[in-house]
Image (spheres, helix red, strand yellow):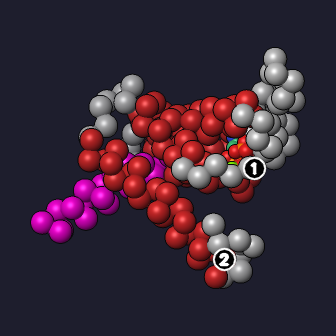
Amino acid sequence: MLAGILERVAAALYFFLPAYVANTLPGIFGGGMPLDLNRKFIDGRPLLGKGVTIRGTITGIAGGTVVGALQGNVVLGFLLSTGALTGDAVSSFLKRRAGLERGAPVPLLDQLNFVVGALVFASFAAPVPLDYIAVLLVVTPVGHLAVNRLGYLLRIKDVPW
Ligand code: CTP
Ligand code: MG
């Protein structure tokens, strides 16, 4: 029973690896020209803001697609990666419309935007098993907190969240 559950959790994480990579790489390699080319929306605020860059988007999609290729499914890797970054950009769009500055934290939206985007895009290719969706929605925010806490304890990060 427990072994069976852990196997499904592991399978869900392996399936989602391209999305995790696509979401992580921009933080390391991103920067430079914003994807919105510094354009403003009709409300006068940035369309997406300076936290969504061309370089970050390209490295994220490329890296996630390479991981998908290594897993033997380029198309799925590409869909999970583009979906992840689209979800992230949609969430930045919504945060700017709410008048929030780039980087302002919105718990759960910040951790789940890329999960929802990647799952929606992946389902264009094939339906995603419901237990995968449940696992990813729960494990991702919890894992995110755990990783950040570890980074804080190792003095890599300034705040434990
Ligand atoms: N990043 C990027 N390109 C992307 C996504 C992210 O370059 N498409 C980089 C940016 O340097 C960004 C960092 O990764 O600051 C962290 O991403 P995220 O937390 O999504 O952005 P925030 O800076 O928090 O901005 P926002 O308020 O728009 O979420
Ligand atoms: Mg953020």
Q: Does the magenta portion include 14?
A: yes
Q: Nearer the viewer, residue 88 or 126?
A: 88
Q: Determine if residue 64 is in view.
A: no
Residue 155 in view in this figure: yes
From the viewer's perspective, is 130 left or right of 32? Answer: left
Magenta span = 1-19
Question: Marks 1 and 2: in contact by CB < 8 Å?
Answer: no
Q: Report the predominant secondary structure element of the magenta stretch.
A: helix
3D distance between C-alphas at marks 2 and 1: 18 Å
Instruction: Please name the amino acid that badge 1 sits on.
Output: Gly
Viewer-nearest residue: 146 or 70: 146
Residue furthest to the top in view is 42
Residue 108 image position (x, y, % from top left): 54, 50
Query: In the image, is residue 116 part of the stretch drawn in magenta?
Result: no
State left or right for residue 15 relative to residue 106: left
**Image point (26%, 40%), residue name:** 129
Residue 157: horizontal and vertical position, in percent? 71, 72
Residue 64 in the image: above or below residue 36: below
Up-down: is 13 above or below 35?
A: below
Tell me residue 41's x, y (percent): 80, 21
Residue shown at the point (48%, 64%) measured from the top left: 143
Q: Quadrant of the C terminus?
A: bottom right
Q: Kindly state the secondary structure of the residue where label 2 is placed.
A: helix
Residue that label 1 marks? 103
Q: Quadrant of the N terminus?
A: bottom left
Looking at the rendered structure, the secondary structure element under dot 1 is loop
Q: Which residue does the numbered mark 2 point to in the structure image?
A: 152
What amino acid is at disc 2?
Answer: Tyr
In which image quadrant can residue 40 be found? top right
Residue pictured at 39% horizontal, 25% vertical: 124
Specify whether tag 1 is near ligand 1 (CB below 8 Å): yes
